Structure formats: structure tokens, C-alpha cells
Amino acid sequence: MNRDSLQKNRGVLRLLFLIFLISLLALNWSDIYWIFNPRVISFGIQSVVGRNESINETYYQEVDSINIPLINISAPIVESKGSSDRDFAEALDRGVVHFPESAIPGEIGTAILLGHSAPAGWPKINYDWVFSEIEKLNEGDKIEIYFNKRKYIYKVKEKIFLEIGEDLPSYASDKSEIVLLSCWPPGRNIKRIGVRAILE
């Protein structure tokens, strides 16, 4: 085999490998798209280079999730594949949605977590019901967040009610906070309820 045909074979192999790689990414995009979120990448880099003072951190096997034992909530935290209403609706069927432009749980800033609510007696289909009872949370109640293999405990600070389209109030940027956001009253699109909690 001469040199020209060897180089041609290498070129074909490279092309086939590139096609394979693109196909692999396309077929698995719904499972891996979050890796390409710049906020997740920067958070991962910060944790590797020692953002936290503690060297002996505990890592957890749990998937990204929210747990509120007081009101029997346990649901995955998911990312929306896009910014359209349809993308958000699809994501809300899979769990509690981390709002893309908000902070990452555990980092300084406010992480916004969106969830459906439903009236009493609604069947637990998908996650239509997940934030139906967040109104029962009071100051000092605990919310557990597992994110990027770490566990964070947030304490409820306040409940707020918003008109549709009204922005959340601006909060201090020197703390790690979460806001759980849903329709209110449960199952009706009249107002919004927000539960704000601060990292312990």
C-alpha cells in the first residue's frame, strides 16, 4: 500500500469517527445537554480548584433532586432543553425545573426552581403535583437539595405572592438562596407563589 492510499484511508477513518461522534451526541443529547451549560461548567471548575474551604467534602450518589420531607416532596431537578413554553412544559413533566438564567444550587446567588401545582386529590401523574403544598412551608423549615453530587440544606425564609408576569424581588447576592416557584392557588393560573430559602 503506497503512501497516498494510506493517507486517504486515514482521512476516511477520521471522517467516519467524526460522524460516529456527532451521531452519539445527537442520540444522547437529552441526557448530556446539561454538560454544555456554561454555569454548570464554571461551577464544576470552581469546586475542583477549591472554591469550598473544606477539603473533606462528602459526595453523594443521588441524582440532582429536591427533597422536602415535611410535605412529602421528592423529585428530580431537571434542565429545560430550550426556552420555549413547550420546552418548559416538557421539562416540568420530568420534575422540578432549574430556571436557566438563575444561579446554580450551592453557589452564591438565587437559584429558581419551577414546579407544577395541582388541586387536592389530583392523581400523581408525571410531576403535576410536585409544588401543590409549598404554601404549608414556614420560616425555618428545611429543604434538601442534591446537586452535582453535593447535598445542600436550605432554610425557608419567607413566602411571597406575585401577580402573573411580576418579577421576583431582588435579593442580596452574597448568599446562596433558592426560590421555589409555582402557580397559586394550586392548579389555577391566577397568581404565583414563591418560597425563598437560604443555605444553612
Image (cartoon, helix red, strand yellow):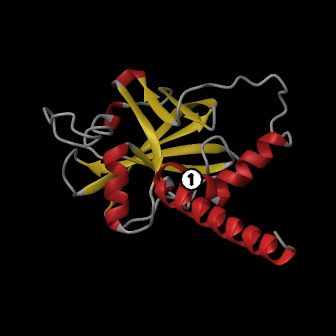
Identify which amino acid the numbered label 1 is placed on. Answer: Trp
Q: Is residue 163 above or below residue 91?
A: below
Instruction: Determine whether, in the image, residue 172 is placed left or right of residue 45.
Output: left
- In percent of width and height, residue 62 lies at 54, 27
Query: Is 134 in front, or is 170?
Result: 134
Give the residue at the far front of this rendering.
1
Instruction: Determine whether, in the image, residue 108 is placed left or right of residue 80.
Output: right
> What residue is shown at x 58% (from left), y 51% (from top)?
110
> What residue is shown at x 47% (from left), y 42% (from top)?
77
Q: Quadrant of the N terminus?
A: bottom right
Residue 40 shows up from this direction: yes
Please give the count of numbered marks on the rendered protein: 1
> What residue is shown at x 39% (from left), y 65% (from top)?
166
- In percent of width and height, residue 81 lies at 45, 60
Q: Is residue 3 above or below residue 51?
A: below
> What residue is shown at x 61% (from left), y 58% (from top)?
37
Query: Is 162 in front, or is 73?
Result: 73
Q: Is residue 176 above or below residue 167?
A: above
- In percent of width and height, residue 92 lies at 34, 50
Q: Secondary structure at mark 1?
A: helix
Where residue 137 sits, quadrant-wise, is top left
Residue 193 shows up from this direction: no
Q: Quadrant of the C terminus?
A: top right
Where residue 7 sits, quadrant-wise, is bottom right
Instruction: Determine whether, in the image, residue 16 is placed left or right of residue 116.
Output: right
Give the residue at the far bottom of this rendering.
4
Query: Is 159 in front, or is 19?
Result: 19
**Residue at the disc numbered 1:** 34
How many C-alpha atoms fall within 10 Å of the one at disc 1: few (<14), some, or many (≥20)?
some
- In percent of width and height, residue 130 lies at 31, 37
